[in-house]
Image (cartoon, coloured by chain):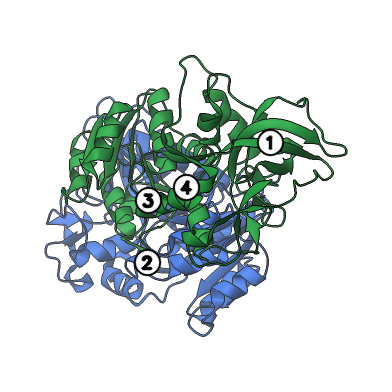
Chain colours: A blue, B green
Amino acid sequence: MRAVRLAETSGPAALRVEQIPVPTPGEGEVLVRVRAAALNRRDLFITQGKYPNIVLPQTLGADGAGEVAAFGAGAQTELKVGDDVVIDPMIGWGDDERVWDGRTSSLLGMPSAGTFAEYACVPAANVYVKPRGLTMEEAAAIPLAGLTAYRATFVRGRLQPGETVLITGVGGGVQTFALIFAKHARARVIVTSSSDEKLEQARALGADLTLNYRTTADWHKQARAAGPIDLAIDSSGGDTVAKLLDAVRPGARIVVYGGTVGEATIRMFPLFWKHVDLLGTSMGSAQDFAEMLAIFEEGQPLKPAVDRIYPLEDVVSAVERMQEASQFGKIVLRID
Amino acid sequence: MRAVRLAETSGPAALRVEQIPVPTPGEGEVLVRVRAAALNRRDLFITQGKYPNIVLPQTLGADGAGEVAAFGAGAQTELKVGDDVVIDPMIGWGDDERVWDGRTSSLLGMPSAGTFAEYACVPAANVYVKPRGLTMEEAAAIPLAGLTAYRATFVRGRLQPGETVLITGVGGGVQTFALIFAKHARARVIVTSSSDEKLEQARALGADLTLNYRTTADWHKQARAAGPIDLAIDSSGGDTVAKLLDAVRPGARIVVYGGTVGEATIRMFPLFWKHVDLLGTSMGSAQDFAEMLAIFEEGQPLKPAVDRIYPLEDVVSAVERMQEASQFGKIVLRID
């Protein structure tokens, strides 16, 4: 089978589409014929060596959708061969809903073999029926970003209908899912970006207020002036956290799931005086994944934002597009 | 009556014991004959001009215990004249348990007249029956620090029996109440201080592990090595927050109620990767106060830690002791 393999951490150009044997599902595993996979920043970071526990050579990819091809011994599942499925990339979260178990958990695609291949082996508990209204490419776009966004927005962020949520850096996968989920939950949504084009795309998805943080230095004050902000969701860190502490209403929540800009220096005063919750999150539990997926089966046919679809062979171009951060929504690989 | 008055913000020495008229309780208020009052860092900060909305001249003091002396018109209370009472200094918290209402709330003693006087007028809702087992001096030691510690430990910190809590800077009023409450709740308690003498006093109150952060540079690593830390409570800020993020277990809570050392620079990674809750708090609601006071009525006769008792006339010495930060527990004024 064809698989996207990484043998050295010299950047996206090191990725190679190679022929390797179809894997055999181990005990309790399902073999999935992957029809579509999606990129995460994690995949880019792995090609650059910026990720813990990199084991090479390896097949990358956390997100995937396809069909059940075979079962390993003792696989506990109601699925049948040929069923359309989507994969939860979070393996072995554990019993504590508060946080994954560091002794048992890992993400598909590193250190284990991932979804950028014709076939992938995953634990049976990680294989879910694909939401009916979605194409394979759309379903593949969901897993890791949708899971992270769902937990950030609803589990950690506790977003309620009618509340206002501020999402920084829209266009990235998690941010865009957070926007879609928040509008679906009848919240008011403010988004920021450095790109007017992305802000326009966010408005098309329902964003109520859009702010270009590059051209609007006091974006956080403008956001605050537009009404009380109940929840902010951020993955940049840096000086954004201090601005969000200023922007949110007393008693608000700020959920952080990354720190791409770097360390944050914050004054304690707004944190304690306003009784703010600053909440860290990353990925999500199996319960989070199931609840998140259910949103795509509810009433209105909700769709993830798919940026571009590349054939598997063009994986280097796809990862380079992510490196440029010019995408809006998920970058998907089609695996014919 | 005698009252401790501040006319200028030039430090503790500016405090004067003066003769002023006994106040008349307004509508819905109770006049309390104050028998004992306690100091908070807030009082020191007010003498130094380091507090918002200072209105001078004024009678200082947030904490007090005494007897009901008279009622204003329409005061809604089951208390009778002569009843022993303790005062909740948080006025007008509002309906939202998450955070006080900035439009209605204030603390007794600034901008309104406080408890460092023979008599004080307070809203009837803020007057509670004094816990039976406590002296007036002990009861007066409780209000603001006990309220803040209760909310930090149980409401925001959600401390459970058997969990481990790390309290930084023991000796201060809030920290010492947090220690007492946490032991009462059958938690394991780790405390830090720069004073071996205070650490010894903390052990006498039940602290299970004590660490001198001045002589033990890696105190946070030693705390972490002693077992999983579920909750940390801090009011220093500065580099302590980063150390606490490192020290606590995944899924832990860190509650901050001050920032005496200054801004905190934190890496986002441990915050989001460990799914930590960094939670701000200050003071507490009426519900918090009632629940906190009830602890002093339960089973074992719980006592606040009283550092020293000064006659009202020695208020300058009392506030200067607080300025030196040499106290362990609350500094109390007796008002004969």
Label 2, label 4: how many angstroms apart (C-alpha)? 25 Å
Q: Residues within 10 Å of mark 1 (few under 14, many from 20)?
A: many
* Residue at screen point 63% across, 42% down: B97
Residue closer to the observer: A59 or A239: A239
Please tell me which residue is depicted at 69% across the width and 34% down the height of the picture. B127
Viewer-nearest of discs 1 and 2: 1
| Residue B272 or residue B301, whichever sits in front | B301
- Asked if both marks, 2 and 4, belong to the same chain, the answer given is yes
For mark 4, does the 10 Å Cα neighbourhood hold few (<14), some (14 to 19), or many (20 or more) residues?
many
Is residue A138 found left or right of A61 in the rendered image?
A: right
Amino acid type shown at disc 3: Ser
- Residue that numbered label 3 is attached to: A282
Q: Secondary structure at mark 3?
A: loop
Secondary structure at numbered mark 4: helix
- Residue B293 position in % (x across, y down): 57, 28
Say which amino acid is labelled 1.
Answer: Arg
Residue under pointer 2: A265
Residue under label 4, please give it.
Answer: A151
Outermost residue on the bottom side: it is A215
Host chain of mark 2 = A
The CA distance from mark 4 to mark 3 is 8 Å
Name the spot of residue B182 as percent of width and height, x first: 40, 29
The residue wearing badge 1 is B33
Q: Chain of mark 1?
A: B
Residue A332, picture quadrant = bottom left
Task: Tell me the CA gap for discs 1 and 3.
Answer: 55 Å
Q: Is residue A97 visible from the viewing direction of this image? A: no
Marks 3 and 2: same chain? yes
The mark closer to the camera, 2 or 4, is 2
Question: Can you say which quadrant of the picture contains the N terminus of chain B?
Answer: top right
Q: Position of residue A154 (x, y in %)?
A: 54, 47
